[in-house]
Amino acid sequence: MQRRPSAFNANAAEALLDANLQAALGAAEAGFGVKRRKAIMGLPEFDALCDRAAAIKDHVLDHLDTYLERFEAQVFASGGMVHWCEDAEEARQTILALCRSVNARMVTKGKSMVTEEIGLNPFLEANNIRPVETDLGEYIIQLADEPPSHIIGPALHKTKDQVSDLFHTHHPALGFPDRLTEGEALVGEARSILRQQYLQADVGVTGANFLIAETGSTVIVTNEGNGDMTQIFPRMHIVLASIEKIVPTLEDAATLLRVLARSATGQEMSVYTTFSTGPKRRGDADGPEQFHVVLLDNGRSEILGGKQRDILRCIRCGACMNNCPVYLSAGGHAYGATYMGPMGSVLTPNLTSLKKSQALPFASSFCGRCEAVCPMRIPLPGLMRELRSDAHEQRLTPPRERLWLAAWAWLARRPALYHALSGFGMRALHLLARGAGRFAWLPLAGGWTRTRDFPAPQGESFMAQWARRAKTEP
């Protein structure tokens, strides 16, 4: 697949023909959906918590500068350092300088979408520093030389047989010659290999689910414990986080954590929730000697001042993509960007440019499921609709599409003609269907009929029924 957002349509068409991908997506849909519903049913106050969580983030966005400065002061007070980075290049250079300050040759990494956003791994490799992903999903896709296909399940697109093939290709050189096929055995083999990496790493890099202004703490949630070992064993711990991850207090973080895991994986709480505050102190048995937080803007400040700022409430739970029929058909790689699914269709055009990613806001059926399951009450269909409108006004959409929309708008402003033509079209299509009730092919509708039948109109239009009812009712 092409790794650029503008190629979404071609990528999606390719994904629909990938049998392994379709099997993996089908399993993901069943697993995430059932677990989420079960977790929410066990928490009657879930909706109230979501309202509270959204209010917390709105408050933070209204006072972002205040809370970021408070966070910085608390990190300094605990013995850590904060580095402010305007864009991806500045963040990469900052992390490289920190790694070189301790003569780092290997870096272990926890799962972090922000490191993907700035392209940290290839940058470190180009500078003779070996990055090792320690999250199992990230480790798998690192072996495959692929980007994540899901925010919380990076290797969600891989079947167990594909993972087995990957391990059998890469692990014999590390002393594991046998081809394993059972999930538990594959996990055990990966764990054995990664155990030595933790001990040898000079620097550990993690992201952050939340930054707490009250204490200067960073928070990560994992189910494997790899995040803890990534930051405890090396001499230096670097946290890379975008500026909107800030929350005011520990209590606010607890509220957000209660909705995060339930929305993401259907757990009441992730197995490990780790709060990190500064470097190792005198008397501590373990921990890093240096603690650095790299705060990344990379376009967030501009989003904050615009009409799409609601997307900055996102806590990266992945619920929107777990319930999106487009994502669950095309997979994450089809989006050609770091962030995928409905939230990616909004965030990517705002972080890069609408010109480079105008196809993404159109990658939605507008069924509304993404908004319905979003714990942060982000109006994703509405934000995508705004981007579609902007793309049309900037003439970024194909000329034929603009022509058809102009023709429809001309008709819509002439109701009598519109209803007459639509009525004629409905009757003609009904007759052409010849009682079959559907079409396998229609002119100008190939995008629909390539993968599904087109239903033939039955009876009157909604407006005709409405008008007839209005005449008969008093």
Image (spheres, grey):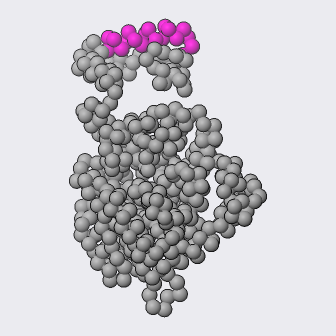
Relative vertical location of residue 252 with respect to residue 452 in this rendering, above or below: below
Q: Does the magenta stretch include residue 263?
A: no
Picture residue at 39% right of the left edge, 44% below the top? 345
**Who is closer to the viewer here, 8 or 311?**
8
Residues rendered magenta in the picture? 419-437
Instruction: Classify residue 53 by image quadrant.
Output: bottom left
Q: Looking at the rendering, in which quadrant would you find the C terminus?
A: top left
Tell me if residue 261 can be seen. Answer: yes
Query: On the rendered structure, is 464 left or right of 231?
Result: left
Q: Where is residue 380 in the image (x, y as percent from the top left)?
A: 37, 45
Relative vertical location of residue 127 with respect to residue 346 in this rendering, above or below: below
Q: Position of residue 65 (x, y in %)?
A: 24, 66
Picture residue at 48% right of the left edge, 21% below the top? 446
Q: Where is residue 402 in the image (x, y as percent from the top left)?
A: 30, 25
Picture residue at 66% right of the left edge, 48% below the top? 162
Tell me if residue 185 can be seen. Answer: no
Q: Is residue 421 magenta?
A: yes
Chief SS of the magenta region: helix
Picture residue at 73% right of the left edge, 62% below the top? 176
